[in-house]
Amino acid sequence: MAFNGASHNVAGEKTGPATGPPPSLSNEAKAALLGNADAETTGQSAPTKPKTEKELEKERKKAEKDAKFKAKKAAQAAGSSKEAAKAAPKEKKKKEEEALPEYVEETEPGEKKVLKSLDDPYHKAYIPKVVESAWSEWWEKEGFFQPELVDGKVKPAGSFVMPIPPPNVTGKLHCGHALATALQDLLVRWYRMRGFTTLYLPGCDHAGISTQSVVENMLWRTQQKRRTDFGRTKFLEITMDWKNEYQANINRVLKRMGGSFDWTRQAFTMDANLSAAVTETFVRMHEEGLIYRSNRLVNWCCKLNTALSNLEVDNKELTGRTLLDVPGYERKVEFGVLTHFKYQIDGTDEFIEVATTRPETMLGDTAIAVNPKDERYKHLLGKKAKHPFVDRLMPIVADDYVDLEFGTGAVKITPAHDPNDFAIGTRHNLEFINIFNDDGTMNKNTGNFAGQKRFDVRYTVVEELTKLGLFVKKQDNPMKVPLCSKSKDVVEPLMKPQWWMKMKGLAEPAIKVVREGKVAISPPQMEKIYYHWMENINDWCLSRQLWWGHQIPAYFVKFEGEEGEGDRTDNELWITGRTEQEALQKAEAKFKGKKFTLERDEDVLDTWFSSGLWPFSTLGWPNKTLDMDTLFPTSFLETGWDILFFWVARMIMFSLHLTGKIPFSEVYCHSLIRDSEGRKMSKSLGNVIDPVDIMEGVTLAVLNEKLRVGNLDPKELKMAEKYQQKSFPQGIPECGADALRMALVGYTTGGGDIAFDVAVIHGYRRFCNKIYQATKYVLGRLGEFTPRATVTKGGKESLPEKWILHKFSIASKQINDRLERREFSNSTQIAYRYFYEFLCDTYIENSKAIFDGEGNEEEKESAKQTLYTAIEGGLLMIHPFMPFLTEELWQRLPRREGDTTKSITIASYPQYIKEFEDENAEAEYELLVGCSKALRSITAEYAIKDSATTYIQPLDSTTHSALTSPTSLPSLRSLAGKMVSSITVLAPEDPAPTGCAVYTIGAQATAYLDIKGRVDVEKEIKKAKERMQKAGEVVEKQKKIMGAGDWEEKVSEAVKETEREKLRAAEVERRNLEGSLSQFERMKLDG
């Protein structure tokens, strides 16, 4: 099954970069995230392009100059030339520490990781490959990811079972697969931590046509041999060896991504049991009359010599005449042209004009159709046209299908080579004449054209028509050209005797279970697509003319002593059996007294046939197994919407028919990943990114080299290299699996396409470092410490402690709710905001004042307990998103009394704790946080680096009381930062200080920064006016966007919140600037 990670956006929505950085981040968090992406990383990152000697010399001189400057500044600050002399060597030492040798993991594979000291050079800062090493092997060996049963039954909480949408075994995983793995594993880990019996079942699909095509190309390229040179048995052995190698590569990437798979249950669609399931299904459904033999139109690839599914056909849009490369032709072939020519009416001098985009198919014409209401041709109905090249008379028939307005109003009918003509031919009982051999040459039915290639005949037919005076004209015609996605050959509709499955009766119950909500499909608009497909379903062509795949268990009966070999389209002459012996017994019973031999069909089944059985064949069906009894139906399927019909619908139909149960209760369709410029991922554009390159880092030179081995056209290669040079001038830095996972989940809004930007992922790498450094800080502060046995309060918590515990409890409640509702992007923002904004930037900063001397021993112990609860809870909360980092850090924390949990993977996920909820503490402390943010923002805005004098003026008595309480000022000083040396809280009735910049703190207070003598007033007035104008423009723009008539109905909540935040920010900025401008004008007058 072709798992298409790069599935399309929601139908009906305009494609493009609909999502960027996750939507509900605050402006500060967004700036921090993207700002971090630009900052220099510490530790091991992607090696950069080697510098020339000249560049190195230039950098050396610059570094020397910089070091001297820093030394001078240090001397000025310390007032000592001796201290200044030490500054430069320190800088040099720091740079030396950053250039570390390649990390080598010392832990034996499968053993619990040996945790080194956080003072170790590789552990001082966050380095992805250091943190992410060794854990996967240990998790697997310990069996943490195997489903845990209690007395042979699932745990009381229930079960969450999800087989992976099996990736094709044909090659490397791409970012679409990475997106799917991140989303799937997030849910599996979340359910596991909540006490569910979980199973995330890995496996691969044999991908019939894709794999055979790749292996055949490889054999020709390396040995100049075709599969027929080896024979079927040997070719299958070669392909199986190839499959084993590539499946191992896929598994390595899935493990590298942190997928919590149960590898003991790994499946492959051609494994013994899955093959037995395929045979059982085919035989059973043939016996039931649902599978039958018929000669009908199929998509035929002349190069690969096989029928194709619709998914294996790419439709190339043409606007008019276009010359295309076609395999097997030296010159390009003309498409996008409508060729007009005439047929003579038999026995008359009259002609009828027709038009076609495929002139070569006129050799298979058996009729001409006109609309019964068309007055121009009523007199010709019942008459016949004479074919100019073959001995054939063609009736003129009336059919409502014909459009009076298109072309001449007369349509040539080629029933054996066009789906619409096939239907007309069936309705009017026309002759079906095949004109092509399987390799695309003309067959004996084409007279003098026999043996020529089909697209050579496209030209020779027109030449012959011209000679006979029957050619009329050519004109440009927009059209779609069907191409084989594997060979790029033009697909030819051909009539072939194949196996087919009746679908109408299977579709009805599959529609019913979705309508009744037994199978939920989201986003909701996907249900409409599902119904449309299922209500207009056609019979399914099962046969593929390949060797690699499940050989069809059907046998043709050849009677002895009869002339000819019999009609292979006759369903009655075919016998199916689970084994050849069973087929023989069936045939003997059916054809008593007759002598015959059985010949097995050489064709294999469409890959989607075995994929359709995936949810239950992987659990042991058709055998009765414990897995089938306890873990089926499965719970969840995450996939691309473009295979909703090809795969998802067929799984539902097969499961209902064969097991009597739904295969899963929920389907989630993810979005299409596009590049940062909004373009679809394509090798020819150079924007297809290997997730391993993001996790481990890669140089631009290596990226370019990967393009060169990809057989790109020289023009495409140049364009692809140009994109890579522009997007990754220094290569891709090492981001790690955790950052990649978190970013991909953050992108998943359930809306349109994903505009994928490596800079955002690198920003999440910096977030990983924030978590890492915060945990290091906590461990350093805890010292010899025993956490409480349970997650409770001690009763003596300070205001900041009450606040962080409240935030933790609310975040736990919210994140569980969002994940339950599959609001993936919002869930990342809750975790991000709790850890980054509440814990790191606020509570940890506040705690420093307690630990650095202001708190007594009782206060310090309470702060330690709260700090432990907050960091432990944060790591648990974020674990399903970032499994490696959280395991690495959680293992370093002391355990609560009686807690013997071996791994964070099986620890309990945070839940809402009512005892921690404290809205009063939240309101009081939020005021302090808001004030400190205002002070930090205003000092940063005016580049005041030290000795800042500030004022806060409450606007009401309640706020004044809160800000003047004994604990408020110490918290404010701690949160405001070192650049602020003085904070004065004014009374509401006090006059506003003069000579200050102004910052509004909501409706509660105003912050002031004394800038007298520290800025150029004229410049600040000019700058403030310009910025105020821009802020006003943003306000008006946002109001216009949000005031659109259908905005409230059409826009998702996540996007709404983003737009509202933009408006709020612009309004606050405008108010601040108005206040500052008023102060500046007064300073100018006073000066």
Image: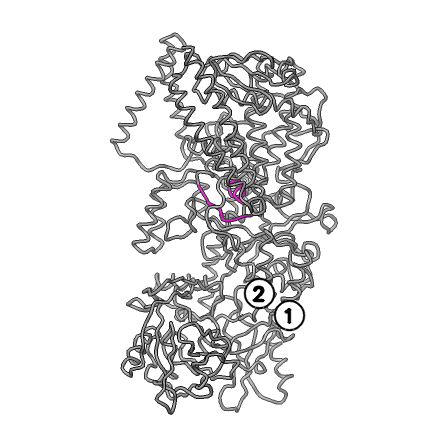
Given residues 1059 and 180, the one toward you in this image is 1059
Q: Quadrant of the C terminus?
A: top left
Given residues 626 and 298, the one toward you in this image is 298
Residue located 37% across and 42% down the image: 727
Given residues 979 and 656, the one toward you in this image is 979
Question: Which residue in the protein does label 1 denote?
Answer: 505
Q: Is residue 796 left or right of residue 2?
A: right
Q: Indicate whether 337 appears above or below 956.
A: below
Q: Indicate whether 175 appears above or below 995.
A: below
Mark 1 or mark 2, which is nearer to you?
1
Q: Magenta segment range? A: 742-757
The answer to whether residue 779 is visible is no
Q: How many residues crowd around disc 2 within 10 Å: few (fewer than 14), some, or many (20 or more)? A: some
Q: Please tell me how many numbered marks the rendered image carries.
A: 2
Percent position of residue 877, x then y: 61, 36
Percent position of residue 495, x then y: 47, 77
Dot 2 amino acid type = Ser
Dot 1 amino acid type = Gly
**Element class at badge 2:** helix
Residue located 56% across and 70% down the image: 538
Question: Which residue in the protein does label 2 denote?
Answer: 275
Q: How many residues crowd around disc 1 within 10 Å: few (fewer than 14), some, or many (20 or more)? A: few
